[in-house]
Image: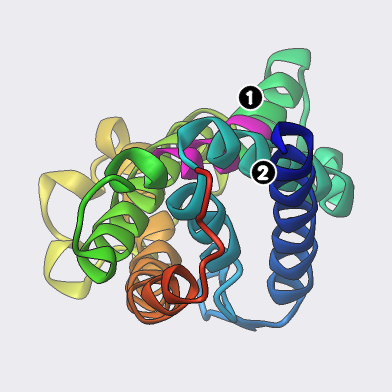
Amino acid sequence: MKNATKTRKLVTSALMVALGTVLSIISIPLPFGGSVTLGAMVPLVIVGQLYGMGWGFFASTVYGILQLVLGLDNFAYATTLAAVIIIILFDYVVAYAAMGFSASTYKMKNKAVSAGLGAVIGCFARFWLHFVSGAFVWGEWADVTALPTFLQDSFLANEDWLIYSYSFFYNLSYMLPETILTAIAAAVICPLLYKKGLAKNN
């Protein structure tokens, strides 16, 4: 019975990773770069909400590796070994693995709240990892026009702050709508899956 349960979790996780990868390809590009996907993070949240943090981190890490393979073109912009390492970790593997934190709420009784809140936590963790990469690798492309208009004459536009404020607002521009979409979709879908009994023997 234990082996059957583990096999079911493995198969479900693989299917969710595959679905997330397909959804990541269907995206809406944004004016300043980045894009909003068709809920690519939702399957990762589902795995964590159904089976806990271990499975959540496993599925999210595998997803991150697949995204790394799909995004190899980005390494053309890396000018140092350190930049390559930061891109690998903070743009891909560790950044997406952080979605495993979405499982930190999975024991909550209200599954809609659990999934929605978990999605926000996972996306928040992912955002800060992308922020690090944006500041330390992509900072040379920092552009004051990426900042909100009312901040373009503030200290955040000064040279010492620009790479950080640019990375913050650039990543926020796509992660905020991505987070909202993920949280809403996860809050709707996860309770339905619990009712179907997919979380049995968790």
Measured Cα–Cα span from mark 1 to mark 2: 21 Å
Q: How is the image coloured?
A: rainbow
Residue at x-position 74% and y-position 51%:
8
Q: Label 1 crowding class (10 Å Cα cut-off): few <14, some 14-19, many 20+?
A: many
Was residue 124 drawn as part of the magenta stretch in this picture? no
Was residue 96 drawn as part of the magenta stretch in this picture? yes
Amino acid tagged 2: Ala
Secondary structure, mark 2, is helix
- Magenta stretch bounds: 93-101
Give the mark, 1 or 2, whose residue is nearer the N terminus: 2
Secondary structure, mark 1, is helix
The spot of residue 122 in percent (x, y) is: 39, 47
Amino acid tagged 1: Ile
Viewer-nearest residue: 48 or 123: 48
Viewer-nearest residue: 111 or 34: 111
Viewer-nearest residue: 179 or 148: 179
Viewer-nearest residue: 43 or 177: 43
Residue at x-position 40% and y-position 44%:
103
Which residue is under mark 2? 59
Which residue is under mark 1? 86
Q: Tell me: residue 9, above or below residue 25.
A: above
Residue 2: name its quadrant. top right
